[in-house]
Amino acid sequence: MLSKSCVYSLRSIIFIAYHASKEVKVGIKEIAKELELPEPYLGKILQQLTKHKIILSVKGPHGGFYIEEEAEELKLIRVVEVVDGLDFFYSCGLGLKQCSETHPCPLHDDFKLYRDGLFTLFSNTSIADLVHKIDKGNAFIRNLTKD
Amino acid sequence: MLSKSCVYSLRSIIFIAYHASKEVKVGIKEIAKELELPEPYLGKILQQLTKHKIILSVKGPHGGFYIEEEAEELKLIRVVEVVDGLDFFYSCGLGLKQCSETHPCPLHDDFKLYRDGLFTLFSNTSIADLVHKIDKGNAFIRNLTKD
DNA sequence: ATAATAAAAGATAAAACACTCTTTTAATAT
DNA sequence: ATATTAAAAGAGTGTTTTATCTTTTATTAT
Ligand code: FES
Ligand code: FES
């Protein structure tokens, strides 16, 4: 549903929000290593996010990425919008050119329920919300280490 | 979420169930034209579905595709399984290698709700269910003609 | 100023997905 | 039997997504 670029983005932003601040930034290498993501690809993704002002970056020694406190209130849907676009949330589940109430596909009512539910979820959930869960130890952003 | 191959498959099967029988078959051309799908690509897709016995085909004059009455009870999830696989329904929404109750991502509980809901929907809905909606005029499988 | 560091930028490569074209095979009707 | 029809099979193309590599630019510490 979400592209790899998009889930890599979300996990990285959460990681950055959790570990970095204006004082202590985190680099591509650290993020890639901790989240087990392909490093050069991650670079491209973070570059895009920076361009869209979703995260901030500083070059040079002790440089890296961080995010402003307030920015943590950013809703997930904004990240999805920037990376994948919002087409999915307006498209027919059976691939009709137009999702429509008056000319619906036979899956419309049921599909819409979940599609809109996901949209609402992403729209109401902020990065901060997810960071809090991590912080409380109720959720994880890193893969389970298998040893 | 579902690939194009998959939604093309579903719409085509519905079309075949609605229009064809052992006596009167429908050809690739007719399906492609009515559903506005790329004809050669559709050929490949129907070929796969035939190989998996989801639909039946006959070559030669008055040949084409049809589906047995009983087969209309086929659940949508079976088509998804054959065409796309079921990975989506077992995967983490934030791209962790494993979706897990004991090592969940911060979106797990909410995401699971919709992911499992969709799985249940596809598991409980049959081709016949959708054909009935079309039959009653409550739903459509063809695009709205824009004139 | 200079060297070291780390991201930005750009060019390229590999893989997956969507789509097309051509030839072959099987079925039917004459 | 033969011609016709329509799907099967296989090879090939284009596009998008995912991933990699190299060079440049900006920042910081010395
Ligand atoms: S018309 Fe298919 S989901 Fe709305
Ligand atoms: S762990 Fe992410 S959805 Fe279950």
Image (tube, coloured by chain):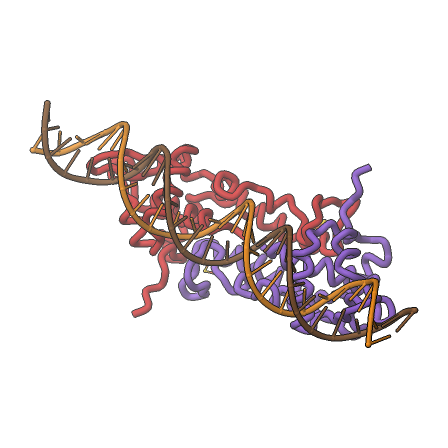
Chain colours: A purple, B red, C orange, D brown
Q: Does A10 sit above or below residue B78? A: below
Viewer can see residue A72: no
Q: Position of residue C5 (x, y in %)?
A: 81, 62
Residue found 72% across the figure and 56% down from its top = B107
Task: Work out which quarter of the rendered image holds the C terminus of chain A and state it.
Answer: top right
* D21 and B27: which is toward the camera: D21
Whether residue B20 sits left or right of residue B2 in the image: it is left
Indicate the quadrant where residue B68 lies: top left
Q: Position of residue A31 (x, y in %)?
A: 77, 57
Whether residue D18 sits left or right of residue A98 in the image: it is right
* B130 and B141: which is toward the camera: B141
Numbered disc total = 0
Residue found 73% across the figure and 59% down from its top = A12
Task: Work out which quarter of the rendered image holds the N terminus of chain A and state it.
Answer: bottom right
Q: Position of residue D29 (x, y in %)?
A: 90, 69
Q: Does D29 sit above or below residue B127? A: below
* B115 and C1: which is toward the camera: C1
Whether residue A122 sits left or right of residue B58 in the image: it is right
Residue found 70% across the figure and 51% down from its top = A37
Viewer can see residue B136: yes
Q: Position of residue B53 (x, y in %)?
A: 41, 33
Residue found 43% across the figure and 44% down from its top = B127
